[in-house]
Image: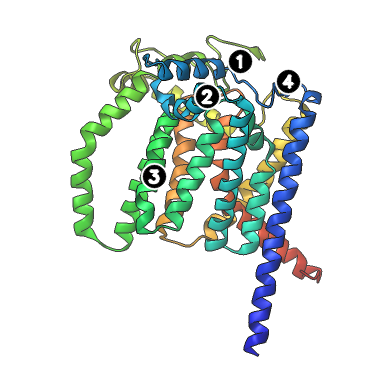
Amino acid sequence: MLRYLDRLKENHYNNEKILIIIIFIAWVIFIFSYVFLSQLINHGGLTNGYKFGGDSQYYINETKNLINGNSVEMKSRLGLYFVLAPFIYFDIPLAWFSFFQTILTGISAFCLYKITSKYFSKFAGLICLILFLFFIPIQLRNYYILTDILFIDISIITTYFIFFFKKNFFLITLICVLFLTLLRQNGIIYFLSILTALLFYLNYKKKYLFIFFYFLLFSLLAFPLLEILGYLSSNSDLVKSITERGIIYGYSFDTKSVCFNNCHSLELIKTGNTSTLLDLFNFYQTNFVNLLKLFFYKIFWLLARIRPYYSDLHNLYNLIYVIILYPSFLYGFIKRPKNNFAINVALMFAAFQILLFGITFVDWSSRFSLYFLPFIMIFSSYGISNFISFIFKKFNIAA
């Protein structure tokens, strides 16, 4: 009997491995199809295996400055410069940079599978793997010389280290968190997510003495943290972006056209010409009501992912994904393991990203939503897996 049970487990394990291999093979075919057929896509064609975004050439020039020992202007992208440096220094074709990002995306996809399988089910893990690998907006980012896909992949891999934490993971986890901060300013949110999840954990365990020392340490670190936040904000030109760029970057809902100044009808009073923390505080305080309205508008369009200037097919694709992801996320959120440190880190990271973009920058392509969607997928996959299992049982379909 025991041998029979062991054989069943082994067969189940082998079937699971086969399914994972099939999914990754389908993903590779999907990726290669895009590479070889990209020229047929309007504005989607690759140049020698990679694609430039609006800031790509600027990042390459900054990387060259770093290699040559010159100062760089946008220090908030140092992480990208470090990754690009070997390709630029050794004159390696940037197509290999795209390949490197694609491999990293494959690794992060497997991390998502392992995370979801650990806390929900293997079936949910497979669904999460599919959701991530075949979500076109994320996969296209593998070919851009930008920070987006690196930020997404490293944040997922960092989360994997936290979910499967061991003592020898501490250093690599710390390096990953620091690297996220060097990739983009919003990388510091991961550090804040860990701190918030730690507070929840200590409160759940009723470690009130530790909570006291937690706030004591936090108060000691307040000054350097404020200095870091001040540096990041002062280099962001945030006030100008909020007052001029609109609800969706470069688009006016009033004129229904491209716009670069005064893109929304809300009256916002500038309280300074810089974006220091003090300027931002005064700006938000003075314009609280209108900024609150703007916040909800921006959150809606961030989560909806549809855009007035996208094609109907493009918007339909995004809408289908939204309809699948968000209701199933609520189910997964309710059924999640409660008071779990790693789960809370993932949730806090997604929630803080959404809040951050609601009160700060806007984008034109909804790419900022890509930073938190993989974490939504972890919980959504459990809701989807349960719905599929319900359908199977309802109609007596053999699984």
Marker disc for residue 43 = 4
Residue type marked 1: Ser
Say whether residue 321 is left or right of residue 342: right
How packed mark 4 is, by other alpha carbons closer than 10 Å (few <14, some 14-19, many 20 or more), is: few
Quadrant of residue 148 in the image?
top right
Mark 3 or 1, nearer chain start: 3
Residue type marked 3: Ser
Pointers 4 and 3 in contact (C-beta within 8 Å):
no
Task: Give coordinates of residue 232: x percent, y percent.
Answer: 35, 24
How packed mark 3 is, by other alpha carbons closer than 10 Å (few <14, some 14-19, many 20 or more), is: many
Mark 3 or 2, nearer chain start: 2
What is the C-alpha distance between the residues marked 2 and 1?
44 Å
Q: In the image, what residue occupies the spot 61% across and 31% down?
A: 96
- Tell which tag, 2 or 1, sits nearer the viewer: 2
Marker disc for residue 252 = 1
- Tell which tag, 4 or 3, sits nearer the viewer: 4
Secondary structure of residue under mark 4: loop
Pointers 2 and 1 in contact (C-beta within 8 Å):
no
Q: Which residue is mark 2?
A: 90
User: In the figure, 101 relative to 59: above or below?
Assistant: below
Q: In the image, what residue occupies the spot 23% across and 50% down?
A: 214
What is the C-alpha distance between the residues marked 3 and 2?
37 Å
Mark 2 or 1, nearer chain start: 2
What is the C-alpha distance between the residues marked 3 and 1?
34 Å
Pointers 1 and 4 in contact (C-beta within 8 Å):
no
Pointers 3 and 2 in contact (C-beta within 8 Å):
no
Task: Give coordinates of residue 385: x percent, y percent.
Answer: 67, 60
In front: 17, or 140? 17
Q: Which residue is mark 3?
A: 193
